[in-house]
Image (cartoon, helix red, strand yellow):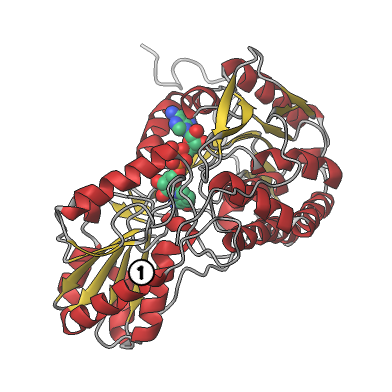
Amino acid sequence: MSHAIDQYVPADLPSRIQHYIGGRSVDSVGGATFDVLDPVSNQVYVQAAAGTKADIDRAVAAARQAFTEGPWPGMLPRERSRVLHRIADIVESRDARLAELESFDSGLPITQALGQARRAAENFRFFADLVVAQADDTFKVPGRQINYVNRKPIGVAGLITPWNTPFMLESWKLGPALATGNTVVLKPAEFTPLSASLWAGIFEEAGLPEGVFNLVHGMGEEAGDALVKHPDVPLISFTGESRTGQLIFGNAAPYLKGLSMELGGKSPAVVFADADLDAAVDATIFGVFSLNGERCTAGSRILVQREIYEPFVERYAAQAKRVVVGYPHEESTEVGALVHPEHYDKVMSYIEIGRGEGRLVAGGGRAEGFEVGNFVAPTVFADVPPTARIFQEEIFGPVVTITPFEDDAEALALANDTRYGLAAYVWTNDLKRAHNFSQAVEAGMVWLNSNNVRDLRTPFGGVKASGLGHEGGYRSIDFYTDQQAVHITLGKVHNPTFGKVADAGPEQRGHGS
Ligand code: NAD
């Protein structure tokens, strides 16, 4: 089957994408713009404002003013919560349009983009609920002292986000940052600026005060860098590649900023011989090919116990070949187009590397029938040794490795044998093994006999090169707030008195001669 390029283009695309600063949509100070491509044709469909330090300075000044002079940080949690619920309502009511634009801009399959839009609404709703239920610690020392925590927003939060599920990942930071009373400057990913530019209208409609939300588009090395180095931005929440995280960590060090780092992954999916094989095959297929494989928690290294290894590989490869690659806007599409030709080239280069490192059992290049656009066939390499680059490095596309293991000890050694530690998936029906393995694996999050389904209250974060700190639930509230400790004396003042001996002459003080 060959697909002609009768490309789907959403109606009413914006004619340009601007920054949003202090309640106004504006161009860059210097007027610079950058090209935005759609991943199906790789044609430029719009120009976006390319922010520089001057734009970040303006955005931070607006956010700073809204923080020091505006009502937002001092509003009752219930009042802020109402605004956040309205934001969630609006996002929900526009989920189809959001998904349409996100899918067009990022290449994500439309059904999956729709799920992400709904999840974005849920993030706002969740933090709207959490801040009104927020209780802080009080410590009593009977008759003597009472101590309480005065929780305060910190100031201007800098939010830097990646291009995979952009709208949802932005909501994940915006929700808690705003719920707790901070003001923000968001620097979204340059590959996918379209959905981010919808926030301004949504926030205005929901009644968010002017200057609380600011948005600067642009390159990471320019706009992102200026945000990281701005002295009036005490917090940076970053999601992206581990090496960008390292750079930001260094750049933020002189300012001693609060940092939350959600970074890359190369997560193992471990299938023991006693597992429910039907569920394990379905889950490990979905685990790496959903969201085009552009998923930080993708189970991109499958480890399979030797007894079931060959039948597993055969079944897995057959199913991977049936995964439907298609145009992002089509309901039947399971894998769409990768975000950008640069990323496509990167994924394809790993496929070439993989040919020399493992046994190719499915896919292996451009998806059949698509002459243009960033379409990659779901690709499976079996017999991949842990020394292989495709075993060690994050590919961030629809490419998976399968490696055999003999016993629990070897499975654990293989699972832990990368620099990353974001997620791990374990498939077994042995209760003891399941828990022992989960607790020993070096991963911030483990799913046992489960795909990646996450309750919003649970901690999210990675270990090793996959991140620093945890977000999710009250941990996000902790990141975006200061917990000032206030101590009050109740009884007699506990005051060892110095300098009490009124007329102490030099002799009494022991200095006499
Ligand atoms: P990236 O690191 O290239 O870019 C992320 C953001 O950082 C972009 O907005 C970019 O413009 C900005 N940036 C780049 N250089 C910068 C600099 N020097 N200073 C400040 N900002 C800078 O990542 P990406 O390619 O957009 O996203 C894919 C990566 O994100 C993958 O590694 C993936 O695993 C990771 N990711 C992690 C999570 C998680 O929660 N752990 C979630 C999603 C994606």
Above or below, 207 relative to 95:
above
Q: Which residue is at 55% across, 47% downward?
A: 106
Q: Nearer the viewer, residue 338 or 92?
A: 338
Question: For mark 1, does the 10 Å Cα neighbourhood hold few (<14), some (14 to 19), or many (20 or more) residues?
Answer: some
Q: Give the image quarter of residue 450.
A: bottom left
Instruction: State the residue position of label 1.
Output: 321
Q: Which residue is at 30% across, 79% downward?
A: 315
> How far from the left and from the top, in percent, is residue 62?
73, 24
Above or below, 248 relative to 2:
above
Q: Quadrant of the C terminus?
A: top left
> How far from the left and from the top, in percent, is residue 453?
51, 70
* Residue 173 appears left or right of 24: left
Q: Which residue is at 70% across, 26% downward?
A: 64
Check disc 1 and report its element: helix, strand or loop. helix
* Residue 429 appears left or right of 290: left
> How far from the left and from the top, in percent, is residue 495?
60, 40
